[in-house]
Image (spheres, rainbow, N blue to C red):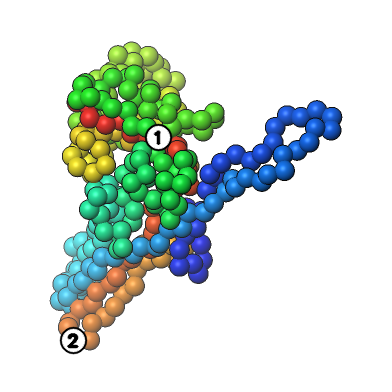
């Protein structure tokens, strides 16, 4: 998703309630009172950069016929990877300590099932649908498919269903063990094994950055997400843009690789969590 042009903030419409109306017959009177169905969430843009540099001699030794490796291109690629890493770490940051004045809103502020956080500038205490779904409590017990199914259903409404489930590595291993028996079913290529790793309609992943202590939850956790309503927007013209800057006091040059971005959501009720399982 790309952000709006010439905007200080990224704004999304948010459905906060249903409008009046329904079935009627003949000349039934319509309700005179209006309802407020739409609000807006506003997210501040954040910037992340890496500045690879190379000295003149090293550059000279790795250009032309003497080139051993495309060193500068490699440095730029590594810088892009480092930005990805920084943004991912910020996304999984502890919501109780994250500095959102400089970094993106951490994922757990959107997932929290209380009115503690109000991401997007909408007061969670005033808007019941601007709160994450009730957390499924694992009670320090072993993860079960019933826990996952309950969280999946919590975040579902009609055809709107989760698209992705994220575990830490240990949780992913436990979940894998629960469904490994399904490998006996053949895929379309007639080979036994997982053709894809899905739970209902949601793809299942793991991420080493996911919190396992602290944050808005107790212990090991899983995130049930809908990436149609939660996503990273990138500023047009500032998505991994490379700006070379030749220093005037040194033999060499540097570059700035930058990304303007924001983690945004327009429907917190499509998100759920499983907490405190083993």
Q: Position of residue 202 (x, y in %)?
A: 41, 30
> Which circle marks residue 249 in the picture?
2
Q: Which residue of the protein is positioned furthest toward the bottom in this rendering? A: 248
- The answer to whether residue 127 is above or below residue 147 is below
- Residue found 34% across the figure and 53% down from its top: 105
- Residue found 43% across the figure and 56% down from its top: 121
- The answer to whether residue 210 is above or below residue 241 is above
Residue 19 vs residue 151: left or right? right
Q: Secondary structure at mark 2?
A: loop
In this figure, which residue is indicated by the disc labeled 1?
Answer: 133
In front: 171, or 59? 171
Which of pointers 2 and 1 lies earlier in the amino acid sequence?
Answer: 1
Real-space Cα separation, disc 2 to disc 1, in angstroms: 56 Å
Q: Quadrant of the C terminus?
A: top left
Q: Position of residue 175 (x, y in %)?
A: 27, 24
- The answer to whether residue 207 is above or below residue 45 is above
Quarter of image, res 211: top left
Q: Are marks 2 and 1 in contact (CB under 8 Å)?
A: no
- Residue found 45% across the figure and 52% down from its top: 122
Quarter of image, res 81: bottom left
In front: 251, or 38? 38
Residue 274 vs residue 20: left or right? left
Q: Position of residue 155 (x, y in %)?
A: 43, 32
Residue 77 vs residue 119: left or right? left
Q: Position of residue 206 (x, y in %)?
A: 27, 36
Q: Secondary structure at mark 1?
A: loop
Task: Report whether residue 102 is seen.
Answer: yes
């Amino acid at each position: 998703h790309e952000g709006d042009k010439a905007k200080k903030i990224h704004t999304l419409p948010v459905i906060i309630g249903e409008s009046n109306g329904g079935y009627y017959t003949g000349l039934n009177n319509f309700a005179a009172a209006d309802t407020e169905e739409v609000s807006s969430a506003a997210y501040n843009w954040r910037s992340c950069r890496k500045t690879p540099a190379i000295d003149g001699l090293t550059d000279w030794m790795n250009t032309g016929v003497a080139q051993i490796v495309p060193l500068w291109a490699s440095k730029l690629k590594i810088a892009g990877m480092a930005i990805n890493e920084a943004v991912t770490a910020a996304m999984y940051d502890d919501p109780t300590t994250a500095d959102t004045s400089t970094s993106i809103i951490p994922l757990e502020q959107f997932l929290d099932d209380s009115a503690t956080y109000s991401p997007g500038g909408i007061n969670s205490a005033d808007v019941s649908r601007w709160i994450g779904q009730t957390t499924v409590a694992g009670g320090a017990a072993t993860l079960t498919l019933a826990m996952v199914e309950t969280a999946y259903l919590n975040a579902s409404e009609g055809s709107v269903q989760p698209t992705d489930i994220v575990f830490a590595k240990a949780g992913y291993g436990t979940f894998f063990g629960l469904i490994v028996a399904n490998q006996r079913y053949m895929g379309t290529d007639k080979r036994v094994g997982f053709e894809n790793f899905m739970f209902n309609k949601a793809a299942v992943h793991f991420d080493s950055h996911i919190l396992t202590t602290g944050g808005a939850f107790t212990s090991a956790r899983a995130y049930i997400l809908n990436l149609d309503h939660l996503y990273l927007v990138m500023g047009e013209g500032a998505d991994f843009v490379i700006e070379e800057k030749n220093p005037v006091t040194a033999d060499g040059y540097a570059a700035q690789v930058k990304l303007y971005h924001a983690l945004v959501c327009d429907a917190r009720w499509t998100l759920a969590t499983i907490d405190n399982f083993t």
